[in-house]
Image: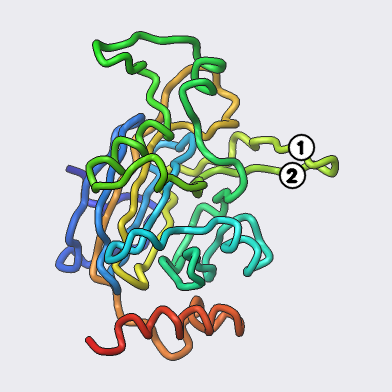
Amino acid sequence: MVQASVLPNMGAIDPSLILLDEKLPGGAYWHYVIKRGNTLRVTDLEGSQGVSMICYNADSPIERVNVADTAKIQFNAFLKKGMVIYSDMGRILFSITEDTSGYHDLICGCSNAASNAAKYGEGTYNKYGESDYNNSRNNFLKALGKRGLTRKDLMPNLNLFSRVAVRPNGDLKYVAGEEKPGSFIDLRAEMNVLVIISNCPHVLHPDTVYKPKPIQLTVWKSPAPAPDDLCRTANEEVIRGFINTDALFAQE
């Protein structure tokens, strides 16, 4: 296992603070509950073709990420350090406390069986009728099933390590070549968050050969937010979001 704390070009993490540290192969998926106050670091090890993510309030999964509100409230469809990820109830799931990639997409959704077949061909199917070209929609559904959730609980996703340009006519173009091996994003959980990650290529990635790259997933005990925390003090809207979020835990 590669220790995330010693990977090149990364902010060092004290090994004593690391709770979980594992590599996720290309095409695979991962699901885990990040406890409030801990941080999930997602690291691009080799130049990712995109990483899709959805998340829920682990204590009440009827509350889940809302990518439209995350973009609208912050006037930005591309995530970066200092921004937050909103739930559909106006509360905060994650704060982005560090980011060395600079390119994360809220617009494009995720790959599915049809988009993969159109780009890569049919591939080889196993006895369950599944292609070896895994796609994020199917990965999400598999992970949801293991958490007692179903297709109706699937919602639009975020895409990490993906630069998408919006042309003047509204067309979307994936900008290849911006991948930076060793870059990472830190997501501090502001409630207990069930996160599901699918390590499959972005639906608009131009490569027609299926070769998703591995990523590193590190959960660590991060420090408590300071009074001037960048994410918690960014603007009046986010301050209200944190008031609503912290109220869930006021009696702990």
In the image, taking residue 24 as reference, residue 18 lies left or right, namely left
Residue density around tag 2, few if under 14, some if 14–19, many if 20 or more, within 10 Å: few
Q: Is residue 179 left or right of residue 216?
A: right
Numbered tag placed on residue 179 in the rendering? none
Residue at (29, 72) in percent of width and height: 36
Q: Amino acid at mark 1?
A: Asp
- Residue at the spot 41% in from the left edge and 78% down from the top edge: 245
The amino acid beneath tag 2 is Val
Q: Is residue 85 visible?
A: no
Residue 96 appearing in the image: yes
Q: Measured along the vertical axis of the image, is residue 211 above or below residue 242?
A: above
* Rendered view: 104 above or below 69: above
Check disc 1 and report the residue beneath it: 171
Residue situated in front as seen by the camera: 201 or 21: 201
What percent of the width, then of the height, locates residue 2?
21, 45
Look at mark 2 in the image and give the residue it sits on: 166
- The residue at the point 50 percent across, 15 percent down is 117
**Quadrant where the C terminus lies?**
bottom left
| Mark sitting earlier along the chain (2/1) | 2
* Structural distance between the alpha carbons of marks 2 and 1: 6 Å
| SS label for mark 2 | strand
